[in-house]
Image (cartoon, rainbow, N blue to C red):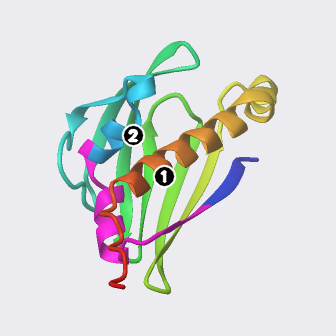
Amino acid sequence: MPVAFVCRTRSAMPPQELFDLSRNIDAHVGSMTKSREKAIAGTTTGLISEGESVTWQAWHLGVRFRMTSRIVRMEAPASFSDEQVKGPFKYLRHTHEFRPDGSGTLMVDTIEFAAPFGPLGRLVEKLVLARYMQDLIEKRNEFLLAQAPPIPEPNR
């Protein structure tokens, strides 16, 4: 039974701009400096598209990981999904949705994952990984929001 959670983030950016920023490899690397994440194979810079993959190398929880993910579905600028094809999880899927919301966008991240190692993996999911992964996505989204141009002050 995979772990699943949803993060909802509001942005002043229009959907297309936030969609492109969310699939930008360089922005992802910038958002993950704490874990020293870098793209080492596949699409390693710029925008990633449907059918393309990227291999990440990073340090999480004191352990170096490599993970390859592929963009398995893309409906610009409304959504895209990526899945782990090789890496530490038994299963990992991240669906990114971008919904118009007033003059900006509601970004909805749905993450589903399962750890390997049977009952031990399920225990680690509940005790550590679920909160760690949610924090990771929330910090990534904070970084993306900080990339938005400032909203101009109204003329008085």
Q: Is residue 76 visible?
A: no
Q: Is residue 84 left or right of residue 133?
A: left
Q: Which residue is drawn at 27% across and 52% down?
A: 24
How far from the left and from the top, in percent, is residue 17?
Answer: 29, 69
Foreground: 18 or 58?
A: 18
Asked which secondary structure carries label 2, the reply is helix
Q: Where is residue 127 in the image (x, y as percent from the top left)?
A: 80, 29
Residue drawn at x 53%, y 52% as measured from the top left: 93
- In this image, 111 relative to 75: left or right? right
Whichever of callouts 1 and 2 sits on the residue coming sooner in the sequence is: 2
Q: Give the range drawn in magenta.
A: 8-26
Q: Which labelled disc corresponds to residue 31?
A: 2
The residue at the far top in this view is 62
- Residue 67 against residue 153 in the figure, above or below: above
Q: To which quarter of the image does residue 65 belong?
A: top left
Residue drawn at x 71%, y 39% as measured from the top left: 130
Looking at the image, which is closer to me, 55 or 60?
Answer: 60
84 or 58: nearer the viewer: 58
Amino acid identity at mark 2:
Ser
Q: Is residue 128 magenta?
A: no
Say if 75 sits above or below 88 in the image. below
Lateral position of residue 59 relative to residue 137, left or right = left
Name which residue type carries label 1.
Asn
Report crowding for label 1: few under 14, some 14 to 19, many 20 or more residues within 10 A (C-alpha): many
Q: Are marks 1 and 2 in contact (CB under 8 Å)?
A: no
Outermost residue on the front side: it is 156
- Which structural element holds mark 1? helix
12 part of magenta stretch? yes
Label 1 to label 2: alpha-carbon separation: 8 Å
Q: Mark 1 points at which residue?
A: 141
- Judge the density around disc 2: few (<14), some (14-19), many (≥20) Cα neighbours within 10 Å: many
Quadrant of image for the C terminus? bottom left
